[in-house]
Image (cartoon, helix red, strand yellow):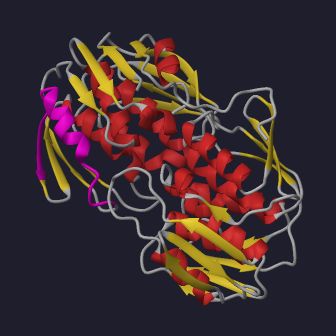
Amino acid sequence: MDKLSIRGNGPLNGEVRISGAKNAALPVLAATLLTAGAVRIGNIPRLRDITTMVELLQTLGTQVEVAGRGELVTGTRHSHSVRAPYQLVKTMRASILVLGPLLARFGAAEVSLPGGCAIGSRPVNLHIQGLKAMGAAITIEDGYIKAHTTGLRGARIVFDLVSVTGTENLMMAATLASGTTVLENAAREPEIVDLANCLNAMGARIRNAGQATIVIEGVHELHGAQHRIIPDRIETGTFLVAAAATGGRVRLLDTAPALLDVVVDKLREAGATIRSGADWIEIDMQGRRARAVSVVTAPYPAFPTDMQAQFVALNAGAEGFATVKETIFENRFMHAQELQRMGADIELQGNTAIVRGIAKLRGAPVMATDLRASAGLVIAALAADGETLIDRIYHLDRGYESIETKLARLGADIRRVPGRTPSAQVHPARKIG
């Protein structure tokens, strides 16, 4: 199992390009099951989760071909299975996103209950209740969600809780349902908008994506299309925080600063000077130590839960103290214990972390517990004295493309220590199916 060796090496400086958003690419890949036509998708990041989704689509009979760096072409004309097996679904929670498309197009689906990061309960009941409201018969047997329908129909669905994957799944299913579906208290994330844009390019009729109420008018069938994945706002935020934690100056290219307003505001509060254009953003700490900033996670457009661990790491070495309150997941402070191994002064009180900054963290052996916790440990290691060895970095490979290569370009002293099993990636310039 690979590890990362990082030695604190002063401020990060330079520029790097941001990859496509994993959380946008995964639902778009699932959406290709809705049509027999070819869908060409650009700006696909090279990540373990993308590999898993491609393997899942292939298991369902989808043909997937790499058309160039960061570009895939899918075709489901010969899809032959509606069963998403446990072996694949257990490693990635986003696998649940094939449920709605399979049911809508083929009238049946068998999807294993999902796995993924151990960051707390993320029940699938919202997906199931919504599909039942649209006319599906659903049971859970032997660890599988088994769904059947003679035809989905439009419905008014009100989410008890805001759910990103729930919104995506039901929005995809509704594109082929008869009549109109209204999703209320829907998620508003940019990735929802990106999926809707792709579906509309395929012939769907979706209005108000990005708002709390989404309206979908069902159509008889969807067709092939071309779509480019939006930049990864969480990768962008992670690199910005890494620069802030090390007192550096970093410019990020091929990104979308407009998707990060609340994160940028918090970094300015921490003492950063930030400039941006339509597709770039630059942070400059001028060698200064960051000030601690308090945050409260909440659904978009508020502060993202996927940036919480990075700000805990920033606060651990900042001036002053701050509170970080997690309102989305109940088990997302597992990185706190690992940061404490590096000398961090963190006190947990329920869903709040009280962080008192210290002058300098110390390198130590630590273990990644989930994707974003991994990013927080990397940031802490970059700002620490001595060597930090981060174990279980397969979590990082799920969500950050070539993170050690990008950080090395910024001057970081970072290297991958190979383990017994190499990280999985989508290999370029060959057919995958």
Q: Which residues are magenta?
A: 329-348
The reply to whether the magenta stretch includes residue 203 is no
Q: Is residue 317 left or right of residue 230?
A: left
Q: Front-most of 424 and 325?
A: 424
Q: Is residue 163 left or right of residue 76?
A: left
**Residue depicted at x 37% and y 20%:** 4
Q: Front-most of 15 and 57?
A: 57
Q: Is residue 15 left or right of residue 369?
A: right
Q: Quadrant of the N terminus?
A: top left
Q: What number of labels is visible?
A: 0
From this view, report whether residue 98 is shown above or below residue 235: below
From this view, report whether residue 200 is shown above or below residue 69: below
The picture places residue 346, in percent across and down from the top left corner, at: 12, 41
Q: Quadrant of the C terminus?
A: top right
The reply to whether the magenta stretch includes residue 347 is yes
The picture places residue 154, in percent across and down from the top left corner, at: 70, 87
Res 408 seen here: yes
**Residue depicted at x 38% and y 18%:** 248
**Residue depicted at x 43% and y 81%:** 160
Q: Front-most of 185 and 95?
A: 95
From this view, report whether residue 149 is shown above or below residue 80: below
The picture places residue 11, in percent across and down from the top left corner, at: 35, 14
Q: Is residue 52 left or right of residue 11?
A: right
The picture places residue 45, in percent across and down from the top left corner, at: 63, 36
**Residue depicted at x 65% and y 64%:** 83
Res 172 seen here: no
Q: Quadrant of residue 94?
A: bottom right
Q: Quadrant of residue 34?
A: bottom right
